[in-house]
Amino acid sequence: MIKKILVSQPKPASEKSPYFEIQAKHDVEFVFHPFIKIEGLSSLEFRQQKIKILDYTAIVFNSRHAVDFFFTLCKELRVSLPEDMRYYALTEAISLYIQKYVVYRKRKAFFGKTGKWEDLVEVMAKHKTEKYLVPLSDVHSDEVARTLDAKKLHHRECVMYRTVSNAFPDDLQLDCDMLVLFTPAGVESLLKNFPDFEQGDMKLACFGPSTKKALEEAGLRVDIAAPTAEARSMPAAIEQYIMAHS
């Protein structure tokens, strides 16, 4: 019987979250605590990559984290961005977020329509004279570089932030019936914070094939894996499991 579920993410800001709908419908308790956190590189660490931001004419953002850490780093490095610097974003939401730091009427911004790199690169390919700088996390695939190379675009990827384990408060116990994980880094954090972790009867739910692989490589049992054709989201997969085992 599933009564308490620990979700390794921040508590949703909206009461309309599907997690709370499941909580009300199935008489279960959700507890939220992020297992990982994102932190920016120091200016010293960034300098070790030997990159000069002003050598580039356009910055490409794939997340709000990238936006925040890029402009924070520019401030620390005392880099004054030129008025004609261009900005490219994976989605419109990220593009609008750039306005937190940039006055749009003085600069140009572009974004993809689908949230996929292939779509954004089609937009970037229309500006082949640009020199693109792409801030990324320390954990990233070669997809970006391969996609830009295919269009013969001048680009450079750089690390500006990283994912690290989040500390657990003393009063947070793994006394749940189900634990929900979303990233390999979350799995790493679990094992770091609880080196003697034994799964026992606890159900482990995960999102994405890389998270599932990390759990299995750690010798743990995966009870719920999403997305699937029947459950495209983690809440849907959790509810499906609860209904099947109630």
Image: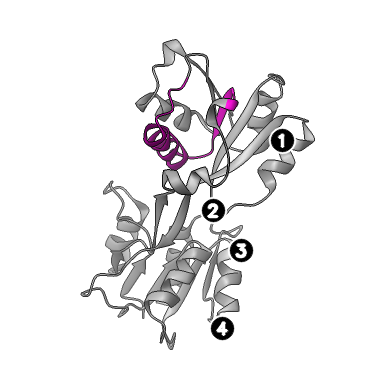
Residue segment shown in magenta: 55-81
- Closer to the chain start, of discs 4 and 1, is 1
Q: On the image, numbered disc 2 is attached to which residue?
A: 138
In the depicted structure, whether residue 119 falls above or below residue 126: below
Q: According to the image, label 4 marks what residue?
A: 219
Q: Is residue 48 left or right of residue 165?
A: right
**What amino acid is labelled 3 in the image?**
Pro
Element on which disc 3 rests: helix
CA distance for labels 3 and 2: 19 Å
Instruction: Residue type at mark 1: give it.
Output: Leu
Task: Please tell me whether mark 4 sits on a helix, a strand or a loop.
Answer: loop
Among the two numbered marks 1 and 2 on one chain, the one whose residue lies closer to the N terminus = 2
The reply to whether discs 3 and 1 touch (Cβ–Cβ < 8 Å) is no
Dot 1: element: helix
Kind of residue indicated by mark 4: Gly
> Mark 4 vs mark 2: which is more N-terminal?
2
Residue 148, disc: 1
Decide which of 63, 238 is in the foreground and name it. 63
Q: Secondary structure at mark 2?
A: loop
